[in-house]
Amino acid sequence: NICDFVLYRAPTLYLLELKTVGTPSASLTSLFGKYDPEKRCYKKQRHLQDMAKAEQSATGLRALVVICYRRTGHTYAVTARDVLEWVERAASGGRKSIPEEFCINHGTPVAARQLRVSWRYDVAEMMEKLGGGGHA
């Protein structure tokens, strides 16, 4: 599958890759699998590339990575393109994790509340913030 979740809210189709981390900085290995030095990419990096490519080639399509930082209880929707740029910089000697600060600066906050074990996200509010219009 190209992503974890597909959501349609007229007139926009959203491709969502959902990630949850328990540390202040999301390790790229924990998010996207083992790094392959020969291919110079992470195992699941192809998902991001496919999502970004789909967004670029289609009108009315948004590709987002939703990252929940359990330690702070904050969740952000960041474009697949922004996350992919971060991952590619990491592959060329940059940082090997995505700090919450990156999501604060490049993402859209997503209201969330923790259930017993998992989290519940306010998708309608996220759609409003992202400018999706229409009704959920």
Image (cartoon, helix red, strand yellow):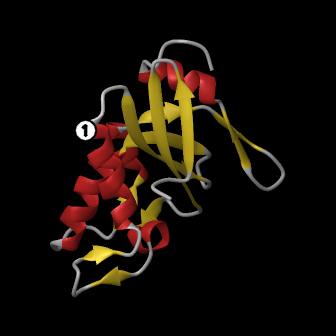
Q: Quadrant of residue 47?
A: bottom left
Q: Residue at x 80, y 46 (%)?
A: 115
Taking depth in this image into account, of 125 and 58 the one nearest to the observer is 58
Q: Residue at x 32, y 44 (%)?
A: 54
Q: Quadrant of residue 89?
A: bottom left
136 w.r.t. 118: above or below: above
Is disc 1 surrounded by few (<14), some (14 to 19) or many (20+) residues within 10 Å?
few
Q: Residue at x 61, y 31 (%)?
A: 111
Taking depth in this image into account, of 53 and 107 the one nearest to the observer is 53
13 w.r.t. 120: above or below: above
Q: Residue at x 41, y 81 (%)?
A: 34
The residue most toward the left is 92
27 w.r.t. 48: above or below: below
Element type at marker 1?
A: helix
Q: Quadrant of the C terminus?
A: top right
Q: Is residue 38 left or right of residue 58?
A: left
How many discs appear? 1
The residue most toward the right is 116
Q: Is residue 23 left or right of residue 130?
A: right
The residue most toward the bottom is 38
The residue most toward the top is 134
Q: Position of residue 49 (x, y in %)?
A: 30, 57
Q: Position of residue 59 (x, y in %)?
A: 31, 27
Residue receiving disc 1:
57
Q: Amino acid at mark 1?
A: Ser
Taking depth in this image into account, of 55 and 105 the one nearest to the observer is 55
